[in-house]
Amino acid sequence: MSQLKVRKLTELLSLEQPSVLYYLENELLSYGGSLFIYGRAGSFKSFLAIELMHALATGNRWLLYRTLGTPLTTLMVQAEQVEAMYQDRMMAYTQRRISKPSLVDPYMLFTTSQNIKLDDFRGIAQLEQAIKTHHPKVVFIDCLYRVVKSTVDTTSVGRFLDDMARMSGQYGTAFVVIHHPRKESENDYGFDELTGWSGIANWADTILRITRHDLGPHGPTINLRWEKTKNARKEVGDANFRVDQENLKFLVH
């Protein structure tokens, strides 16, 4: 059995730190950290995740928020659609948003599996091997309910979270997880709306809630509410965006 690493204060202070501790300004996504993005169906969660992936891969802003300014390698684990359908989605995004796909090729990696389970040994081993082979700094999981047997089973979700924490510690991998609310209700329950075991909300570093509104003649708008920002040194305010569906852009509203 491996022993706990016990260090003196001076030993702890002398450890070599990662060159970068935060990938998204306001300390919203950290080295080895976790960000949950959740909202109802049709609230553009997946496109926001693709947009964040692209921003990290190019070093550009994500919506209002600065990234590093230099490219990061990212991996999308996509479990909702068959690969041909996801290819169609990415073709539409690339045609509108990525003028030179070859420039981001080394930094935007994808894997599609509708039967991968990240609460069992085989699925975790597959993901861990991909991390060891391709060294992504940030892994996106779209979406949680497809990669665990049950989001209300504490054993299932606990196993998933334990392995995410282990890989974060071992490889420095940050995870962005797409998720769904518990209730289709007009009431505001805060991050208690996260589907499944309450341990998810306790475990996550950052929780972002997306709410869609279909008002006015200019198409849908979305509200971003930062419901938990554990590492942020100051409060992060809400933001509103108009969704330009023709050009797949999010414009400040």
Image (spheres, helix red, strand yellow):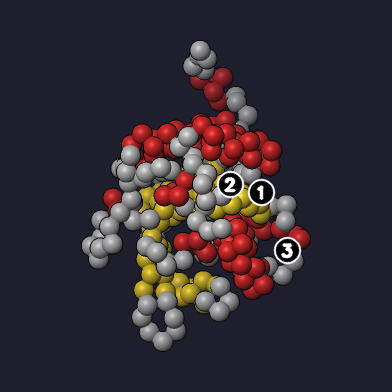
Disc nearer the start of the sequence (3/2): 3
The image shows residue 187 at horizontal and vertical percentages of 23, 62
The image shows residue 170 at horizontal and vertical percentages of 57, 30
Residue at image position (47%, 46%) is: 147
* Marks 2 & 1, CB-CB < 8 Å contact: yes
Give, as a three-letter code, the residue at label 3.
Answer: Pro
- The residue tagged 3 is 101
Mark 1 surroundings: few (<14), some (14-19) or many (≥20) residues within 10 A: many
Mark 3 surroundings: few (<14), some (14-19) or many (≥20) residues within 10 A: few
Farthest-out residue, bottom:
217
Calculate the distance from the C-alpha at mark 3 to the C-alpha at mark 1: 14 Å
SS category of the residue bearing label 3: helix
| Near-viewer residue (122 or 128) | 122
| Near-viewer residue (180 or 135) | 180
One can see residue 238 in this view: no
- The residue tagged 1 is 73
Q: Identify whether 198 is placed above or below 79.
A: above
Disc nearer the start of the sequence (3/1): 1
The image shows residue 4 at horizontal and vertical percentages of 49, 16
Disc nearer the start of the sequence (2/1): 1
The image shows residue 105 at horizontal and vertical percentages of 72, 56
Give, as a three-letter code, the residue at label 2.
Answer: Val
Q: Quadrant of residue 108?
A: bottom right
